Every structure is written in C-alpha cells, then in structure tokens.
Image: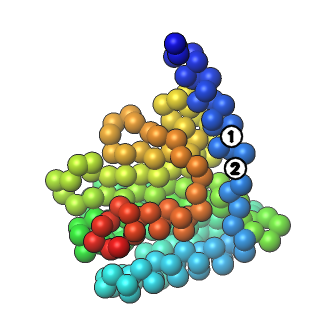
Amino acid sequence: MSTISDARKLARDLDTQLGALARFIDGTGLSCFLRIRGYLLKQDRRIGTKHNLEQIVQFDKGPGDKFQIFLGPLIDKGQTESFFNFPSGSRLSFSIALRERDGGCDILTYRFHFRFPDNHSPEFIRIDLLDKSHSDPLAEPLAHIHPGIHSVRLPSPPLDPIEVLDRVFFVLDPNTR
C-alpha cells in the first residue's frame, strides 16, 4: 500500500529524471525564434487566419546568454489582439526562456496556454516546464500538463517548443487538423 510519503518520494524521483532529459535545441537564439515564428506563419496560412506575427511574436534578449520568446500575455486575462486566435474561438499564448551555449540553446522554461472557446470544459490546457523542481513535485511536477482543473498538474516529458505547438494545432484544436 502506498502512502503520501511514498508518493512524494516517487514524484521527487520523477522530477529528477525529467530534469535530466535533454532540453537542447540546435542553433542560435535568433534561429530558435525564427523557427518558432516560421512555424506559426505556416500554421497561420494553413488555417486561413491573418495574424501579424512580426508584431505578436516577440524576442527579448535578456542578460548575458539568456533570452525569451513570447506570444501574447503571460497570464490570459481575456481576449486581446496579441494572442494567436483560432477560427474555433480558441486562443494561444506562450513564453519560452532559453540560454545559448555550444551552438544551441538550452530550454530553461516554457508556458504554453491554450484557451478553448467560451463554455468549453475544460476552459484551458497549459503545458509548463519550470526552471526548478517545486517544493512539492507531487502537486506540481517540473514538466507538466495542467488540464484546466484546479490544482491538477500531470507530469509530462520536457518537449521541444515545436512539439508543443504540434499538439496545439493537430490535437487540441480539432478544427485545424
């Protein structure tokens, strides 16, 4: 029989394993940014939306070798033109933090927030990679999917941002398959 202590130990062990998984993208910070914006441009054309991706997808050079890529607000507090809006009424925002090194980029953190149309259950799906393990990895794993249910976060492997976007465009929004 498993106890809460056993479950927390297993969760800590899983966080250690998730943290050890390679989260490295080939290319410079700028090439990572252009790859993500290029992906969104292809999807924008494919599904027939007309976003100003040069305006809504942002590159922010931080201190030293770190940088961030943004689309929309960090926290979804309602509709704005800064989201990637889908014909279904869904919308996407994200933030990705990376660090350049050795001809590529380490993925430090990400947060992809996909909000379904009004009156949909669940309201959203969020896919997160934290910068470090939470004090309670059973409740908040290092890499996780938040299925729009309060306080529920399910562990997942760290993904390349394009892999996350593939799930958004080809799984979460059925109208864009």
Residue for badge 2: 21
Task: State the image coordinates of residue 103 (x, y, percent, origin top left).
Answer: 80, 71
Q: Quadrant of the C terminus?
A: bottom left
Q: Residue at x 58, y 41 (%)?
A: 142
Asked whether the viewer can see residue 55, the reply is no
Q: In the picture provided, is 120 more to the left or to the right than 172? A: left
Colour pattern of the rendering:
rainbow
Q: Residue at x 69, y 67 (%)?
A: 25
- Tell me the kind of residue under disc 1: Gln
Q: Residue at x 56, y 61 (%)?
A: 96
Label 1 neighbour load within 10 Å: few <14, some 14-19, many 20+: few
| As drawn, 155 above or below 101 | above
Task: State the image coordinates of residue 66 (x, y, percent, origin top left).
Answer: 69, 62
Label 2 neighbour load within 10 Å: few <14, some 14-19, many 20+: few
Residue for badge 1: 17
Q: Which mark is residue 4?
A: none
Q: Residue at x 38, y 34 (%)?
A: 151
